[in-house]
Amino acid sequence: MQQIRTVITGSGSYIPTQIKTNRDFATQEFYAEDHVKIPAPSSEIVEKFKDITGIEERRYVTDNLTASDIGIAAAKLAISAAGIDPETLDQIIVAHNFGNVLPNTIQTDAVPSLASHIKNGLGIKNPNCIAYDVLFGCPGWILGVTQADAFIKAGLAKKCLVIGTETLSRVIDHFDRDSMIFSDGAGATVIEAKEGDENSAGIIAQSMQSHCDAELSYITMGKSYLPDANPSVRYIKMKGRKVYEYAMKNVPMAMKACLEKAGVDIHDVKKFFLHQANEKMDEGFIKALFKLYGIREIPANIMPMSIHKLGNSSVATIPTLYDMVKRGMMEAHELKPGDIVMFASVGAGMNINAICYRM
């Protein structure tokens, strides 16, 4: 039986050109939350950081670029890959957390919305192309795709552009060792309504949750850890252990719920595209998910990773990773028609979500 399917028809990404290696932090002074200098040598802190997160390098944008600028660059590639006229887009959905942050400033700029900036930058004149932003922490791009799916299934849209873009390098406290996690980047996808049956390409199922009790304080904004820092200047702050424990408990269950809603056997999932925040955490997600099914032996090459060289660019990690695999940029990873994949993420809120998708 024919039905409307929500299909990713094109992808694109922007990977910033400035490479910041772990060596660049070797002389940085780090302070703890109590504003006391961490006594361990910086080189030792950096090495331990690499062992935990897997991050060797991260990318920062150049001073002349903003989150909307790199979102435009990723969007152009996605539109080209989809082969569509941008004037036919019904929606532009942009996920981010901090808007446009200019170099050496302390304010974020989200008025007008980044989506409005990106629509303007793409030269789209069609007033019926609605541009808006979503704020959902790191899972924002997945939420944007879910919203596009809902509008398509409701018959209110046929083509949507969903973008995740962030310049976290401009909101980090360099005296906080957690700052080494964060990076910049943008990823974009064109989402279209296509006719097909239940075995055709498209979104199969999704799941999401928000935990906003004690979890609200796990990722917040706060003053620098540097003693006597200006309290009016605020940076992204993370309770790493709390985030890890929350994610390990909840993300695998959300992934399992999504698979069950989709009616998909876990052995049929060819690739897991997970938010790139921590190598050990992502490996833990997969182990915990398979353990929920009573499976201890994990298939090889099911989890592409970009965190080692690109770091954590928040909403951009998953669409960037997906685009890199689609374009054959990741050795040992490829996607074929009919493959089933899962997208899953976790972030400030705290929020989690997952999508099961057939290529």
Image (cartoon, grey):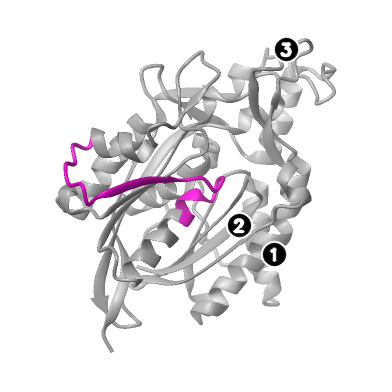
Query: Crowding near pointer 3: few (<14 within 10 Å), some, many (20+)?
Result: few
Q: Residue at x 34, y 73 (%)?
A: 338
Query: Crowding near pointer 2: few (<14 within 10 Å), some, many (20+)?
Result: many
Quadrant location of residue 341? bottom left
Q: Quadrant of the N terminus?
A: bottom left
Q: Residue at x 37, y 23 (%)?
A: 65
Residue type at numbered disc 1: Ala
Q: Earlier in the sequence, mark 1 or mark 3?
A: 3
Quadrant location of residue 52? top right
Residue annotated with mark 3: 229
Residue annotated with mark 1: 288
Q: Quadrant of the C terminus?
A: bottom left
Alpha carbon distance from label 1 to label 2? 16 Å
Is residue 266 something that shows in the picture?
A: no
Q: Residue at x 57, y 79 (%)?
A: 260
Decide: is 103 above or below 222: above
- In the picture, measured across the screen, residue 339 lies left or right of residue 252, that is left
Region of the chain picked out in magenta, as a range = 122-143
Q: Residue at x 77, y 10 (%)?
A: 228
Q: Nearer the viewer, residue 62 or 105?
A: 105
Residue annotated with mark 2: 352
Residue type at numbered disc 3: Ala
Residue type at numbered disc 2: Ile
Residue extending farthest top: 228
